[in-house]
Image (cartoon, rainbow, N blue to C red):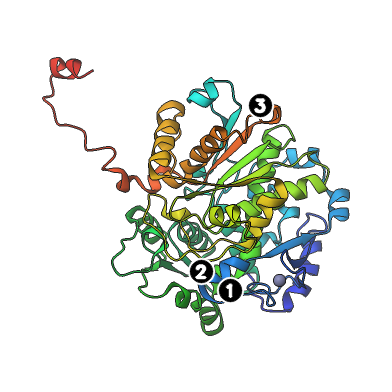
Amino acid sequence: MIMLAGDDRAVMRLIDESRSGEGRAVYATTLRCVFCGTEYPLIHRGSCTRCARSGEESALHETLAVQYDVAALKRRLDRDELARRPPDLWRYRELLPIVDPAFRVELGAGGTRLVPLTRIAEAVEGRRLLVKVEGSNPTGSFKDRPIGVAASVALEQGARGLACLTSGNIGSAMSAVAAKAGVPALVLLLADAGLADQGASVNVEKYVQISAYGARVLTPIGNLGHLYAFADRIEAEMGWAFLHNLQAYQTDGDKTTAFEICEQLGWQAPAAVFVPTGTGTNLFGLWQGFVLFKELGFIDTLPRMFAVQPIGAASLVAAWETHQAVPSALERIEPNLAPPISHRVSGYHTYQAMQESGGGAVAVTDGEMLAAMKDLASYEGIYAETASAAALAGVRHALARGLLDTEESRRAGIVGILTSHGLKNSLALTGVFPSPPKVEGTWEVLRSSL
Ligand SMILES: [Zn+2]
């Protein structure tokens, strides 16, 4: 693998176009801030320098989006061409920023099922509900998409190692990619509810999984804002990539979820999409994906985008209900059963996607998430992390408020994104599902228990 730095990449891109055998491979043009419109070259790192905020609040302005040459893409790509390719992340390679196939980390991300629900009550009543089962990605969560793309970009840009600050799923995805690419990884693992406090505990399943991939895992204690500042130091002093600085490319990975949904629905967008989310970057990425597919003429309509967050950690819901386009940071996060979608701040980009699409944001309780998790598992055979099941809880909220019972919803369908697998947080649920009782191993006893 050739390591490049800085502007040398531009030269490499030109070389690779002829070497890759995939035709002209560069359709990404610039990074554009969706807040102020400033454009940056593709090698720019971090946020928009005009809008950036420091530390944890940087999530408010993760506003850079990769722009593409849509006219050139229209000439190169059509629906038949896409349909012929293997169902994984790199099926959409022209719509992703990676150039040289040698830098694509192939873990088998993407190509997840879009499942029509048939047995839960709302489906039985005749509504068209579907779930995108992202827990079947290689490391068990949707993060294999954004991290797979962002890490590949980092490696192409010459990163000698990968680092991140995470409550778990980003760490698993990044560590697996680092293992496959043969580079070291550092995971700063936050405790429950995205806290860096001394008293909070980390998710056992997640640190075991991350450790198994061979990453160095540390649970830093201290101010979250200060921890984010490590991003620049680890890049400057060690030559590693801190994935927080590659947000725009993570967003591009999230787009592939939207692309797949459209293909799986017969080149149509659903009426609405429900995304469990913390800072909201995945919702923004999906929206960007739907918009790009429409610009390319692959679909005719766009869905309404809804964010789902836990009550007590619902920064987007607070912003939505008070028409606050740039959400302010919550004072604190109340402990809840959905740490992956608990974050004090959410982004302007997400608010904009909700607004442009005519969607919104809904907050759900622990009880509602648990009920949704149990229903998905016991009626549909799908075991999702509690934070993921928030998608169904959010759909139920919107149905109860009359936001979705339209002809469009019945025809085009409502999609919930089940972001991660239930095995990611089983230990937290031993209170819900107690140990099985020990009984005498005789037929009479077994028969009498049924
Ligand atoms: Zn800006």
Asked which quadrant contains residue 339, the reply is bottom left
- Residue in view at x 59 percent, y 66 percent: 60
- Tell me: 373 left or right of 134: left
Q: Given contact means CB atoms under 8 Å apart, are the residues at marks 3 and 1 in contact?
A: no
Alpha carbons under labels 2 and 1: distance apart: 9 Å
* Dot 2 amino acid type: Val
Across and down, in percent, residue 340 comes to 45, 54
Quarter holding the C terminus is: top left
Let me know if residue 167 appears in the view. yes
Q: Residues within 10 Å of mark 2 (few under 14, many from 20)?
A: some
N-term-proximal mark, 2 vs 1: 1
- Mark whose residue sits in front, 3 or 1: 3
Q: Disc 3 marks which amino acid?
A: Arg
Q: Which mark is residue 159?
A: 1
Q: Residue at x 65, y 68 (%)?
A: 156
Mark seen at residue 410? 3
- The image quadrant where one finds ligand 1 is bottom right
Q: Which residue is mark 2?
A: 183
Q: Residue furthest front?
A: 322
Nearest to the observer: residue 62 or residue 216: 62
